[in-house]
Image (spheres, rainbow, N blue to C red):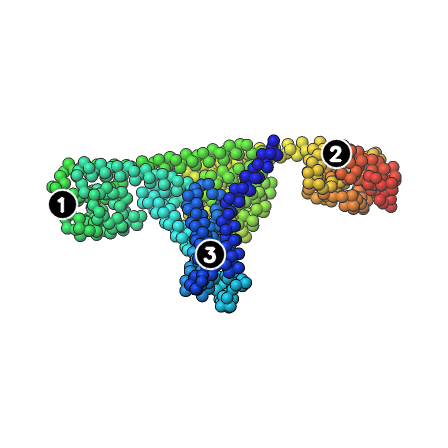
């Protein structure tokens, strides 16, 4: 059943393709007839009018295709079908044009330049995937007329020039098309940028940006958040302002009622909202310090005029009739922010009651703006406290020191913007500050470094247990104060804040943030950074305790190597990776020869020193990706990732020789120790972990009973090297 459906689907698709491509077939037949010279010049005597009828049939086919294309829904055409359809229609148009030219005299026809116009049209108004093939097809049609069996010598001679002109016209139009598209894209991008800049400027004029529930007055850099908040606030303000002004216009029978707002420098007035019946309003910036407007801004008092001269009302740019004018300052405290203006085309001057109503409306305008400021401040504060809460939650979840560092940096970034941050741990024994994590500008030079300068700002913070500088201001390291080391001054920063990390009144480290702009850490931000620093200090202590517990749980207390349980877990994980990625894993099991005799002769403390020395050599010989473990007693294990038998044997021999060259001290004199080693390889010797361990243990047994101080690989009858 499923096969029948697939077959039916294939047949349907083929039929649909054939129905859709019959235009190509018609074009192909017509091009062949052109090649054979089947379309004579009708201007010549005895021309075949029947063949002209075939050309008319081609024109009918072209018209049918054009009509079908116009009726096809854009949504039903996939991109590849649209390209296919465009090429088909273009070929029909080209074929019809060349048949028309052939009937009218071929390449010598006076209407031949029509070809260049057609190529220009096809290339300009189609995508390149359509235009270029059609331009090539035009050159092909030229070749048909020039080199067919019935071609005239004049057509053959003209082919290079005609083909060259087609190429030139195509390339020029491609270049024009791309240049025009690029220009339009630039204009569109510039228009968007201008709109965003206009919105930001309007928000600044309304004092929406830089408004917070603290003393911060700078423009914040969280652009996305500011734009979203400002855009919503501006739309709300404009809606409320328009309804207020339109209500005034209707109730007081005004011609124009508008709100003029001062720009940020106080030199220009611009309409922020307008309700007017006049077509002569000049909405561009108006001078703010001259004329009637300057008097209202300067004195802060209303102004009423009866039949004012047109020059006194610069917001009109045409023959507007004004019988009465009233203006009221829009003030915030003692500062005038703008003007509420109103005028009538006819009627009496504004009376006291109407002036009071305009004054009340001016107060309402200011309250609208102020309410949006409060709303923005609340929303911003809400967002900041949400990020602050997430940072605290992340610090509470952090277990490892790396997680604590990441959570602390991210939490501080949610509180304020900075260009540099560093977390340093403090060692009270030697007074050193070790920078455990640094991010931002200049972090590479400081990350991982240690500093012991008692005159540094970090040392002062530890000594006084107080954050410095007190106001978060900084002079870029140009004076005698430096954060960590005089040789690595933090130049170019205008804001710096170092906080102590305190646990039970003991300093465990410092947290540093710095920014290039001044005023980056105002009072409310410093308070939140202080809370993050306190929580960071506790998390650091917890991270250290977790690290100690993890080391105790996963490492051998005497040698510091991975213990047996962790070895089994990591070995299983490595074999899983080897099975997925198809690489080899080698296991070396080694045993200290006659270790019981060493303990009995020189004592257990000396035996422990031998174990530590051997463990150190094994760990130094392996790579970071390998596993070095104390397998049990005097037995050790090394797992080598991506290493075959030859590589494992070479490493085992190098270790054996290095141990043999060691001299161990004891109360009874110096002595030497040797190792026996057994090697097994996954998957060559076994594919299961237990079997790989068993094969390596068998090889170790063979090395022990073959004379000791040697390496034996599983499957070898003889040891690789005998004892020396």
- Whichever of labels 2 and 1 marks the residue nearer the N terminus, that label is 1
Residue 532 image position (x, y, % from top left): 49, 36
Report helix, strand or loop for mark 3.
Answer: helix
Residue 660 image position (x, y, % from top left): 81, 44
Report helix, strand or loop for mark 2.
Answer: helix
Q: Quadrant of residue 325?
A: top left
Q: Which mark is residue 26?
A: none
Identify the residue at horizontal 72%, vertical 33% (top origin): 568
Q: Which residue is mark 2?
A: 689
Foreground label between 2 and 1: 1
Foreground label between 1 and 3: 3
Residue 447 image position (x, y, % from top left): 57, 46
Report helix, strand or loop for mark 1.
Answer: loop
- The residues tagged by marks 1 and 3 sit, at their Cα atoms, a distance apart of 82 Å
- The residues tagged by marks 2 and 1 sit, at their Cα atoms, a distance apart of 101 Å
Instruction: Say few, some or many: other residues with alpha carbon within 10 Å of mark 1 (under 14 / 14 to 19 / 20 or more).
Output: some
Q: Quadrant of residue 620?
A: top right
Instruction: Say few, some or many: other residues with alpha carbon within 10 Å of mark 3 (under 14 / 14 to 19 / 20 or more).
Output: some
Instruction: Say few, some or many: other residues with alpha carbon within 10 Å of mark 2 (under 14 / 14 to 19 / 20 or more).
Output: some
Identify the residue at horizontal 13%, vertical 45% (top origin): 323
Q: Which residue is mark 1?
A: 323
Confirm whether residue 58 shows in the render. yes
Residue 283 image position (x, y, % from top left): 26, 48
Foreground label between 3 and 2: 3
Identify the residue at horizontal 78%, vertical 36% (top origin): 686
In the image, residue 632 above or below residue 647: above
- Whichever of labels 3 and 2 marks the residue nearer the N terminus, that label is 3
- Whichever of labels 1 and 3 marks the residue nearer the N terminus, that label is 3
Q: Which mark is residue 51?
A: 3
Image-based side of 712 in relation to 383, left or right? right
């Amino acid at each position: 059943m499923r096969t029948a459906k697939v077959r039916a689907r294939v047949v349907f698709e083929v039929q649909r393709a054939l129905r859709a491509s019959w235009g190509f077939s018609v074009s192909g037949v017509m091009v062949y007839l052109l090649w054979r010279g089947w379309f004579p010049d009708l201007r010549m005597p005895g021309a075949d009018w029947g063949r002209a009828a075939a050309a008319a049939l081609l024109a009918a086919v072209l018209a049918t295709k054009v009509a079908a294309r116009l009726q096809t829904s854009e949504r039903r055409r996939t991109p590849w079908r649209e390209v296919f359809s465009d090429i088909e229609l273009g070929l029909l148009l080209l074929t019809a044009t060349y048949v028309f030219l052939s009937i009218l005299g071929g390449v010598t026809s006076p209407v031949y330049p029509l070809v260049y116009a057609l190529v220009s049209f096809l290339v300009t108004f189609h995508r390149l995937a359509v235009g270029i093939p059609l331009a090539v097809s035009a050159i092909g049609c030229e070749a048909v007329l020039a080199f067919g069996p019935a071609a005239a010598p004049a057509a053959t001679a003209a082919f290079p020039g005609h083909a060259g002109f087609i190429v030139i016209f195509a390339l020029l139009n491609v270049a024009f098309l791309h240049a025009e598209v690029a220009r339009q894209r630039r204009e569109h991008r510039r228009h968007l940028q201008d709109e965003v800049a206009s919105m930001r400027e309007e928000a600044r004029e309304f004092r929406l940006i830089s408004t917070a529930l603290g003393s911060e007055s700078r423009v914040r850099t969280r652009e996305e958040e500011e734009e979203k908040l400002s855009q919503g606030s501006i739309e709300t303000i404009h809606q409320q302002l328009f309804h207020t002004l339109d209500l005034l216009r209707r109730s007081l029978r005004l011609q124009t009622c508008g709100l003029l707002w001062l720009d940020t420098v106080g030199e220009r007035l611009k309409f922020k909202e307008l309700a007017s019946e006049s077509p002569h309003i000049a909405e561009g910036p108006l001078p703010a310090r001259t004329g009637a407007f300057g008097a209202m801004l300067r004195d802060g008092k209303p102004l009423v005029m009866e039949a004012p001269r047109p020059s006194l009302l610069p917001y009109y740019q045409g023959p507007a009739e004004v019988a009465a004018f009233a203006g009221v300052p829009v003030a915030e405290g003692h500062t005038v922010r703008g003007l509420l203006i109103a005028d009538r085309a006819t009627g009496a001057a504004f009376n006291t009651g109407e002036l009071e109503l305009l004054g009340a409306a001016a107060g309402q305008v200011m309250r609208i703006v102020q309410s949006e400021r409060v709303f923005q401040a609340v929303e911003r504060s809400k967002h900041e406290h949400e990020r602050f809460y997430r940072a605290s939650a992340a610090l509470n979840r952090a277990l490892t020191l790396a997680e604590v560092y990441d959570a602390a940096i991210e939490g501080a970034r949610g509180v304020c913007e900075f260009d540099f941050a560093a977390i340093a741990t403090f060692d009270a024994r030697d007074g050193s500050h070790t920078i455990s994590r640094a991010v931002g500008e200049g972090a590479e030079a400081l990350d991982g470094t240690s500093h012991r300068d008692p005159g540094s700002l970090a040392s002062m913070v530890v000594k006084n247990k107080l954050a410095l500088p007190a106001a978060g201001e900084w002079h870029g390291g140009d004076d005698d104060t430096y954060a960590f080391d005089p040789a690595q001054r933090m130049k170019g920063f205008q804001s710096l804040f170092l906080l102590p990390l305190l646990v039970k009144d003991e300093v465990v480290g410092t947290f540093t943030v710095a920014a290039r702009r001044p005023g980056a850490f105002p009072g409310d931000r410093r308070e939140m950074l202080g809370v993050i620093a306190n929580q960071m200090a506790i998390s650091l202590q917890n991270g250290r305790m977790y690290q100690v517990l993890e080391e105790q749980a996963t490492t051998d207390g005497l040698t510091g190597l991975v213990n047996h349980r962790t070895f089994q877990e990591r070995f299983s994980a490595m074999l899983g990776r080897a099975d997925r990625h198809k690489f080899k894993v080698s296991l070396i099991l080694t045993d200290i020869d006659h270790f019981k005799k060493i303990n009995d002769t020189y004592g257990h403390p000396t035996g422990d020193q031998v174990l530590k020395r051997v463990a150190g050599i094994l760990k130094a010989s392996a790579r970071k990706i390998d596993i070095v473990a104390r397998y049990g007693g005097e037995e050790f294990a090394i797992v080598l990732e991506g290493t075959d038998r030859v590589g494992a044997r070479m490493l085992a021999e190098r270790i054996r020789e290095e141990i043999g060259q060691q001299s161990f001290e004891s109360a009874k004199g110096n002595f030497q120790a040797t190792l026996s080693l057994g090697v097994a390889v996954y998957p060559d010797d076994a594919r299961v972990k237990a079997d790989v361990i068993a094969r390596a243990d068998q090889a170790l047994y063979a090395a022990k009973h073959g004379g000791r101080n040697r390496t034996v690989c599983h499957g070898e009858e003889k040891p690789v090297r005998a004892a020396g």
